[in-house]
Image (cartoon, coloured by chain):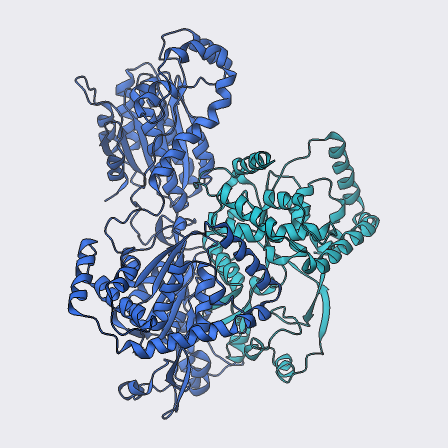
Chain colours: A blue, B cyan
Amino acid sequence: MSIDTFPFPAIVGQEELKLALLLNAVNPRVEGVLIRGEKGTAKSTAVRALAALLPEIEVLEGCFFSLGTEETDGFCKGCRLCEGRRPAVRRPVQVVTLPLNATEDRVVGGIDFEKTIRTGQRKILPGLLARCNHGILYVDEVNLLDDHIVDIILSAAASGVNTIEREGVSFSHPAHFILIGTMNPEEGEIRPQFLDRFGLCVEVKAEKDRRARVITMERRDAFDENPSDYVNRFDSEVRTLRERILRARLLLSKVLISGHLRVLIGEVCAEARVAGHRADLVMEQAARALTAFSERTEVTKEDILRVAHMVLLHRQREASPPQAQDKEEEENHGRPHDRNRPEETDQEKNKKPEQKSGPAPAPKSRENEGNNTCEKPVENPEKNKESETPVNPETLQKIFEVGATFRVKPFSMTKDRVFRRGSGRRSRSRVNGLNGRYVMSTLPRGSTDVALDATLRAAAPHQRGRRSACAIAIEPQDIRIKIRERRLGNFLLFVVDASGSMGARGRMVATKGAIMSLLLDAYQKRDKVAMISFNKAEAKLALPPTSSIDIAARMLTELPVGGRTPLNSALVKTGDLLRSQFVRDPTSRPIVVLITDGRSNVSLNRGKPMDECIEIAHHLGPDKRVRFIVVDTEEQGLVRFGMAGKIAEALGARYFQTEGLKADTLVGLVKQE
Amino acid sequence: MSHQSIYPFAAIVGQEKMKLALYLNLINPTISGVLIRGEKGTAKSTAVRALADILPEIEVIEGCPFQLAPDDGVGLCRECFRLDCREKRLGGDKTEGIFRRHIRVVELPVGATEDRVVGTLNLEHAIKKGEKQIEPGLLAAAHRGILYVDEVNLLDDHVVDILLDAAAMGFNTIEREGVSFSHPARFVLVGTMNPEEGELRPQLLDRFGLSVHVEGIMDRNDRVEVMERRVAFDEDSTGFAARWAKKSRELSDRIEIARRLYPKVVIERDQLFNIADFCLEVGVDGHRGDIIMMKAAKALAAFSQREKVEKSDIETAAEMALPHRMRRRPLMEIGDNAKKIKEFRREAE
């Protein structure tokens, strides 16, 4: 491709990133690098620029697998792709891009229908894994890659061999490649198994230095204005760097590492409590690459310490989450506060006496927030009148702020064979629309979604015996259809108790924090959410099903608390909403999270509220399509009613008691079987 | 779509910010797009469709499925399926079959399937001839043009992934259904959305160079004007377009002048420092914010037919380039950011 890429030496800063890439260029046994970081930090630019720096290797001319002369003997006998022995040629190490749209047949390889028709013999069309042998496999946005493709790459990377076993061909070839991936952690993480395959990992951030930022702007502008000129300007620098890499490669075999430094590596890895031994091996190789790159032959302690961080970053157990948790918490405390401030001034006249009597605002203390500083009257003038009557907690409505959020452990429905509609990222499912990602093909099963490529490949070997007006005769037994896969977002329904009893002792603050955490998780998974809140006389649909998590978050922040507990009405409403949800999408599998202390005290008819409540729960419970989770917010103490537990039993729900809804308990809650 | 049915761009009342953002992208396509956020019925889609009216012209090879310019390299042609054109190009004949046309607005419908977006195996050719041939997708059609996504926030998740991939790389790689091919895909990404329907993923958000928020017009005279023009257009679209033809011409001339002026526009180092400081202060992710802000400021100067960037250019550029880039938790509102930027500006003064 003759597209000009931004030259490597022109990238400002990002030393860690550049070093990691260079080490890989020097020593393939460093096993790749994963580049994590925010958007717009030259991640992809650097990788593409690397291609221009790569040294040459010796390969057989025209070999699909980039084999060197010394590897041919065993392999070439079985391979009929090229006839006879080929001369060796030199060409640069290749960077093969794996696009997100790749289908299985192109990654693994398969039958080449064009050649097969022409020759009548089954000919193989090697896939990307063949092309990247002795090269670099580069995946941009690697965390968005389809699971199915990830599996293929993992098995090839683990064994160093790729096996094509499809469409009547059976073939294996070597597949030794370096994996380079870029990702933005905001979009979700990648599987630990896959993570471990990357030798190094670097986190990139934008430059904080203003000079560097200005230079970045100038260079980018100059490049965009005239790419080829700009590339020429850096030509000599690129060449110097390339020569240095080549020298380092030659030097690599002479680099020695002393025994006590090996011990040091072991110690460093043990201290970081990494899983497995790959870290140790990679660290040694990376240190040697660094030594060779510095044109020395003896590994030093400094070399090891320089690369240790890159090796360990993604392998440490309980690695710290990418975002600073504290900062997030602070923002959480600050934001809703600000948003409510205008109301405060509006209501100053009404509220002043009460606010003055409370202790001074102490933003760090959860207790205080719950009880004093965060209580806000609602705008509705009618309710203000109520709030003036001094002690009537049952009718007073308050808004509590959102408590601290936390990371939610993954939970999803198990994958099954039911075909579904929808889009999202929580649960993986086969889909029957035309919209999923085409991952593989199969024999027809009542679908009209013909996989043309697979059909042609199936028909190709039989062309000799068939006659047709077209170049290729297809018979019914050749037909293949597409299997598409996509992740489905789930439907999360929050049923939130907003009665007065929830307001006590900061419970609502913690509850809101918990829901917000689930919302943040739902955002990454592209879930749909809805919310029913209940207080005073009846339950209301506070938020109709939506995929706009932002609106849900705003709703939550402004959710007022106070009044009685019409739990029964809420359950009926839940039933209604689920029913309409099933009408719209019969295959959906909603998750209902009921957060309450269970003290139902408003009945729909005349009966006892509690009995009625259990009865309704018994009605809802048997529906196997719905999963219920009950979070009991009742305080532990001498007097406990345990009503929420009974409701959970009637619903067949997973039941959780929470003392003030601590973060780790809720993590346990959402972690499903 | 017949030409007559397009509402003339110049006849759109108000919404100056949105129009300006679109002009800037025409002046410098590497600004890489604009996201138009706003309520329904605020001429979002009308404006983008009407762009066709004022678009500048480019030179392309006739019938080229990849919209190549005559002096582009022939690397891609080597694998192209249009045999006679390929022969000519590889033979060094670069003069024939060149024509000028307006740059294109390619619409990506929300329901588009993946294979139509990236390109796929040409079905007809495969069956008739038994040969593999690529059928280019929308990304190929949008090269050097505008890719327009209406209701971009409703786009299927995996199509978004593909867009991210292509927009980041500047070219599209097809590795599917037995075909393996890659072609350049540099386009201006224009999206419209109604934030009530859900937000965009931050990663995609960042690919839009600028973002503008549009609202219904509050001035009653203007509202009347909107109605009158709309009625006039519906009654007699050809006549209406003819009446506005002169205005449209003026506009496209002005953009053409600005396009030519752009390379001459200078921005001083101090001003670049201002931009860097500003971006550091409001906290944007990465460097794209800085770069887009600089380009937008230069384009603004060019649009005002100046060769020097002024302070006001930088300020306007900040308002368009930063609100959707400021570091925020996923659930923070973009509207809040716009306010914050204004506050910063006031403090600076």
Which residue occupies the foreground of this view, A271 or B145?
Answer: A271
How many numbered tags mark residues here?
Answer: 0
Left or right: B62, with B288 as reference point: right
Residue at 70%, 55% in the rendered image: B52
Left or right: B235, with A214 as reference point: right
Q: Position of residue A364 (x, y in %)?
A: 33, 27
Specify whether residue A484 is in view.
no
Residue at 22%, 66% in the rendered image: A281
Q: Is residue A359 above or below residue A145?
A: above
Which quarter of the figure has residue A255?
bottom left
Locate the C terminus of chain A by quadrant: top left
Q: Position of residue A182 (x, y in %)?
A: 40, 59
Which quarter of the figure has residue A370?
top left
Q: Is residue A53 above or below residue A90?
A: above
Q: Position of residue B261 (x, y in %)?
A: 72, 58
Q: Position of residue A652 (x, y in %)?
A: 24, 34
Left or right: B134, with B8 as reference point: left
